[in-house]
Structures are given as C-alpha cells and as structure tokens.
C-alpha cells in the first residue's frame, strides 16, 4: 500500500433518504483528497434515488433490487477501487477527522489488514444517548484466539469497520443469504485472516432511531441467534481452519434457537441442517452438545424470569 492510498467509502442504504445526505456529505467533506464515495441503494421504496441523483458525478451510484445487506456489500465492493475500504451505514456519519486518523494508524502499522474504531451513539437529533464503550487502541492479532475457538472482545457495527483491500477481497463476495447483520461475517473473517488495529477514538457516529432500534425489538435475541447460526455455517464453509470458533458459535446460537423456536423451528433453517450434516462429527458433538444445552437452559430461564417479573427481555437478554 502506498503512502497516499485511495480510500473507498461504501455507503449501504435502504429507505434512509432522510439520513442519507448526512452520510454522503460526511464522506465527501473529509480533508483527504483521494476518496471515492460509493452509494449502494438496495431497492429503496422512498425517494433515495432522487437524493443519490442530486450528487451527480461526485459519487458512484449503485442502484439494485432489494437483496439484503450482504448483497449491498458485495455490489459496492465490486465497483470500488480503493486500497482501503471504509463502510458507512446510510443513517450514520463520519467525524471530520475519520479518514485522517485511519490513515495515521495504517502508516504506523502497514501490515494490519483491518481497523475497527469506537462509535459514538446519538439519537435522531444528534444528541448523545449514553456512555460510549471505547475499544482499547493498538495493534492486535486474534488469529490464534479464533483458531483455538476462544472468545473475542466486542467489535463495533458496520460504520466502525475499515479494511485493507487485499484482505477484504478474500471475504467478498460474501453469502447473500445473510440479509441482516452481515457485518458479523466481515468482522470475523478479517480478524481470522490478518492482524489489525483498534482505535479508541469515536471517529464516526452511530445513529439510534425508530427505524434501526434493533436492541429494542422484542425478537432481538432471536434475530441475533438466527444470524449468528447462518454466519457460523458460512464462516466454517469459507474458512475450514476456523472450525473451532465456528463450532462454538454454532452451538451457542443453536441452543438459543432451540429455546425460542423449538426443535422444529431451529432445525428448519437450511444452514442448521447443513452444518449438522457436514460438520458435526463425533468429536464436535462431545464439546458442542454441552454448549448447546447450556445456552438452551440459560435462554429458557431468562425468558421465564423476564415474563414472571414483567421485564423487557429485549433490553436485558444478550445476543
């Protein structure tokens, strides 16, 4: 990578016309010169196409039929040319020094394949909505951690993710069956493939509002378990050496789904059937069953506890 690499900002949008200008402007107004802004509209039904058209040749538009977040990631990367790829959700926006700080970090550690940074959570009006949990800045390597199936720290959402192109090219195109929370596949793939960097500064804003308030949905834990199970299958298929980590991730998600959907509902997922048939050998069953049962009973207990005391399980149950 050169001292002055091109940076591609990939904005994925679906029915966020009211927020989209803030996202695009925050990318175009970065002081760094060699930046291309790719805006992927995933078949919006609002006036997002008009917003995108208003920017003319200042951006690279990609207008496609609705296919989900993974398909938007694939489409944006396919037309991008940057050496560094920074993702941006259409309802979020970058701080003014985002790309400057990203480049400073990469010049310090040019071999890093990815950079994840802290996000500042704000409401629809831009006001802070609570304490930020910053990442610990520095150069990190979790490849052995994943190889041995050990736990990872929490990583930020899509807008906090940046990748070196050659690393991301080993990840994308990704399976388009992962329609939501596709950033999970991006993060885990890159962390398995390469050392990277964490930045504690909140150099972008994650906007919390009525349309994306995922944590407040009653089915948050169910959707997370569903997505994690799908991600586990596709990660295991793409990266066989990640089997220990993927096996643990699958068992964890399967236990949650069994508690919430029953055997029929959990095993009805094509990825669940495929994983069990292809990867759950005798040795995996020995370690996987215990984890599955633990998460089954844990999820069952939590559901009954919150119902008994009339609490909001969506706000208390971890994904």
Image (cartoon, rainbow, N blue to C red):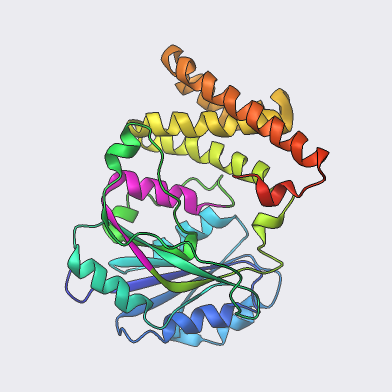
In the image, is residue 100 above or below residue 64?
below
Along the viewing direction, whichever of 52 and 257 lies nearer the viewer:
257
> Residue at coordinates 39% horizontally, 60% vertically from top-left?
135
Query: Would you say 257 lies left or right of 85 here?
Result: right
In the image, is residue 23 above or below residue 150?
below
In the image, is residue 162 above or below residue 53?
above
Which residue sits furthest top?
A: 282
Query: Would you say 191 lies left or right of 293 here?
Result: left
Let me know if residue 86 is in the magenta part. Answer: no
In the figure, residue 252 lies in which quadrant?
A: top right
> Residue at coordinates 63% horizontally, 68% vertically from top-left?
208
> Residue at coordinates 32% horizontally, 38% vertically from top-left?
145
> Residue at coordinates 45% horizontally, 28% vertically from top-left?
247
In the figure, residue 99 lies in which quadrant?
A: bottom left
**Residue 43 visible somewhere in the drawing:** yes
**Residue 88 visible somewhere in the drawing:** no
Q: Quadrant of the N terminus?
A: bottom left
Where does the image place residue 51, in percent across and percent down from the top left?
60, 82
Which residue sits furthest front?
A: 309
Where does the image place residue 203, in percent across and percent down from the top left?
41, 74
Where does the image place residue 315, in percent across and percent down from the top left?
68, 52
Let me know if residue 189 is in the magenta part. Answer: yes
Q: Which residues are magenta?
A: 181-200
Where does the image place residue 319, in percent across and percent down from the top left?
59, 44
């Amino acid at each position: 990578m050169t001292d002055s690499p091109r940076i591609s900002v990939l904005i994925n949008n679906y029915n966020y016309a009211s927020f989209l200008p803030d996202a695009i402007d925050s990318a175009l107004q970065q002081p760094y010169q060699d930046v291309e802004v790719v805006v992927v509209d995933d078949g919006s039904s609002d006036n997002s196409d008009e917003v995108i058209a208003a920017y003319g040749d200042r951006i690279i538009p990609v207008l496609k039929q609705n296919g989900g977040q993974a398909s938007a990631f694939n489409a944006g990367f396919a037309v991008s040319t940057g050496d560094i790829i920074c993702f941006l959700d259409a309802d979020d926006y970058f701080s003014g020094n985002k790309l400057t700080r990203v480049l400073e970090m990469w010049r310090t550690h040019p071999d890093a394949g990815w950079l994840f940074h802290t996000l500042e959570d704000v409401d629809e009006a831009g006001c802070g909505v609570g304490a930020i949990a910053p990442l610990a800045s520095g150069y990190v390597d979790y490849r052995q951690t994943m190889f041995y199936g050990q736990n990872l720290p929490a990583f930020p959402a899509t807008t906090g993710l940046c990748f070196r192109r050659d690393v991301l090219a080993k990840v994308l195109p990704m399976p388009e069956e992962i329609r939501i929370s596709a950033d999970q596949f991006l993060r885990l793939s890159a962390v398995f493939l390469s050392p990277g960097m964490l930045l504690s500064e909140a150099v972008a804003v994650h906007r919390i509002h009525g349309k994306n308030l995922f944590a407040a949905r009653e089915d948050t834990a169910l959707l997370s378990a569903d997505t994690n199970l799908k991600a586990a299958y596709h990660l295991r298929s793409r990266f066989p050496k990640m089997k220990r980590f993927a096996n643990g991730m699958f068992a964890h998600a399967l236990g949650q789904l069994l508690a919430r959907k029953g055997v029929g509902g959990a095993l009805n997922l094509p990825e669940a059937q495929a994983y069990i048939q292809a990867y759950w050998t005798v040795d995996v069953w020995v370690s996987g069953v215990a984890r599955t049962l633990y998460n089954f009973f844990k999820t069952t207990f939590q559901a009954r506890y919150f119902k008994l005391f009339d609490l909001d399980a969506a706000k208390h149950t971890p994904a």
